[in-house]
Amino acid sequence: MDTTTLARPGLATLVADIRQVIDRGMDAGKTAQAVADLLRGRDDLDVGILTPDELHGEPGGYAVHLLHAEKEFSVAGLVWQPGAETPVHDHIAWCTFAVLSGVEHETLYRVEGERLVEIGRSDNRPGDVSGFAPPGDIHKVKNTSSQIGVSIHVYGADLAVAGSSIRRVYDLPVA
């Protein structure tokens, strides 16, 4: 079943609002921040945007549910099991996210020569929103809570075509 055709509470309004931001023609960094501002404090954005089956996630890992995709942007719901984490990676386009449940612990890195250097950490909790654009978007994310985590991500790319938001996975030693 194509999940992008399901009626999802708040999705149509969110997509329309994102289109308005995209239509302003800003650069990637400003677009990411404007979409992040759009996600902050939305009362129509909650875990109900995903189906009960989607909210189970993937045992031991995380699942990405593509909710909407078009040429300029995509909206995805990510479901994180406790302890689930991504590899260290960067992105093909700008990204914003809003945490709906759980705690997404994010570690930020930069490449120095043949190694990664940690440059920051944050614990993103329900209601927290952030946005960023390449370059400078190397990170790893882990659900550090004991409950299933859910977050909504908006990417400046058509994930139905690209298949993933990840551009590169980094397998370098961390300094």
Image (cartoon, rainbow, N blue to C red):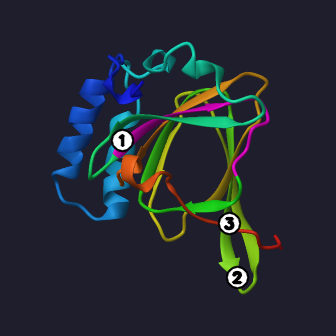
Sequence order check, earlier mark of 1 and 2? 1
**Magenta span contains residue 59:** no
The local crowd at label 2, few if under 14, some if 14 to 19, many if 20 or more residues have their Cα within 10 Å, is few
Magenta range: 74-86
Position of residue 113 relative to residue 96, above or below, is below
Tag nearer the camera, 1 or 2: 2
Position of residue 124 relative to residue 126, above or below, is below
Find residue 131 and name its label: none
Looking at the rendered structure, the kind of residue marked 3 is Tyr
Residue receiving disc 3 = 109
Tag nearer the camera, 1 or 3: 3
The local crowd at label 1, few if under 14, some if 14 to 19, many if 20 or more residues have their Cα within 10 Å, is some
Are the residues flagged by discs 1 and 2 in contact, CB closer than 8 Å?
no
Q: Quadrant of the N terminus?
A: top left
Position of residue 52 relative to residue 94, above or below, is above
Q: Quadrant of residue 175?
A: bottom right
Residue receiving disc 2 = 112
Residue 99 x %, y %: 55, 32
Looking at the rendered structure, the kind of residue marked 1 is Asp
Looking at the rendered structure, the kind of residue marked 2 is Glu
- At horizontal 65% and vertical 20% (from top left) the residue drawn is 56
Secondary structure state at the residue bearing disc 2: strand
Q: Quadrant of residue 31?
A: bottom left
Q: Image check: 149 left or right of 131?
A: right
**Near-viewer residue (125 or 60):** 60
Secondary structure state at the residue bearing disc 1: helix
Secondary structure state at the residue bearing disc 3: strand
Find residue 37 and name its label: 1
